[in-house]
Image (tube, rainbow, N blue to C red):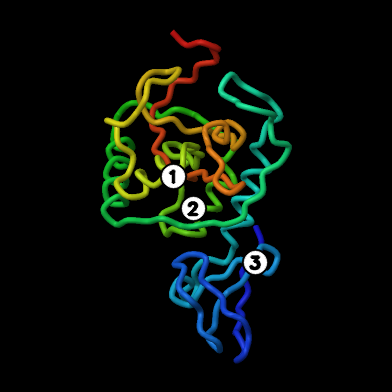
């Protein structure tokens, strides 16, 4: 990922917004910028000794490394040859975070053996988590995965979280579906003004069963 460098706006320069909290950065204030990605963080979102790497460049790396030139039955239209990130927003909630940590501890405290999953996002996912959290990714029980859906569904998830009651039946039954490939999650997105939204999620995988069947029973 690209390194974030200290940067101070000079009086008279155009306005900037923090790409994390979306607040306006006043002229003369110190911020941190990735010039390659045009990605800025204000001083509140980049305290001393915090994140050194640009979110956008890490996510672009994840997109580039996991794209597939392969169509499935859920794909409508041609397979994209590339994916370009136009904007990144970080979403966090203390209540959700506490509940997530509780579920992770339940899984880690189980006597049953963990699965040895190694999704394509393993390496870049660990870097991404380290750039935004003090809790490193437990690769034996967690993964960074993609979730593609409609804009209205994303609004619902961002306001109240993933809801089992709203889940639909998929190939493996009713539940939450995530993918290690951006190409797969893109199949479920819907364009708005030429752009599509995808959630990048930290997921407790726990004990997983690997099934290579095209149509699982």
Q: Residues within 10 Å of mark 3 (few under 14, many from 20)?
A: few
* Earlier residue among tags 2 and 3: 3
Q: Residue at x 56, y 52 (%)?
A: 127
Q: Which residue is mark 1?
A: 202
* Earlier residue among tags 3 and 1: 3
| C-alpha distance separating marks 3 and 1 | 25 Å
The quadrant where residue 86 appears:
bottom right
Q: Which residue is mark 2?
A: 129
174 over 52 or under it: above or below: above
- Foreground residue, 79 or 125? 79
- Foreground residue, 190 or 101? 190
The quadrant where residue 163 appears:
top left
Report the residue that reaches farthest toward the front.
193
Report the residue that reaches farthest toward the top.
217
Report the residue that reaches farthest toward the bottom.
11
| C-alpha distance separating marks 2 and 1 | 8 Å
- Foreground residue, 118 or 34? 34
The quadrant where residue 8 appears:
bottom right
Quarter in which the C terminus is drawn: top left
Element under disc 3: loop
Q: Which residue is mark 3?
A: 38
């Amino acid at each position: 990922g690209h390194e974030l460098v200290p940067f101070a706006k000079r009086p008279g320069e155009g306005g900037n917004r923090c790409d994390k909290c979306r607040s306006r950065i006043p002229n003369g204030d110190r911020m941190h910028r990735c010039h390659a990605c045009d990605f800025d963080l204000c001083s509140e979102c980049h305290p001393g000794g915090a994140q050194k790497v640009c979110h956008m460049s890490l996510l672009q790396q994840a997109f580039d490394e996991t794209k597939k030139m392969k169509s499935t039955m859920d794909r409508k239209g041609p397979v994209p040859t590339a994916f370009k990130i136009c904007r990144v927003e970080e979403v966090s909630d203390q209540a959700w975070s506490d509940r997530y940590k509780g579920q992770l501890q339940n899984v880690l405290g189980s006597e049953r053996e963990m699965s040895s999953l190694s999704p394509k996002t393993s390496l870049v996912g660990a870097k991404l988590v380290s750039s935004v959290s003090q809790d490193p990714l437990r690769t034996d029980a967690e993964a960074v995965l993609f979730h593609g859906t409609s804009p209205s569904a994303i609004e619902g998830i961002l306001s109240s979280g993933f809801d089992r009651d709203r889940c639909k039946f998929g190939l493996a039954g009713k539940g939450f579906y995530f993918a290690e490939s951006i190409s797969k999650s893109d199949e479920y997105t819907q364009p708005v003004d030429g752009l599509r939204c995808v959630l990048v999620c930290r997921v407790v995988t726990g004990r997983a069963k690997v099934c290579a069947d095209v149509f699982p029973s």
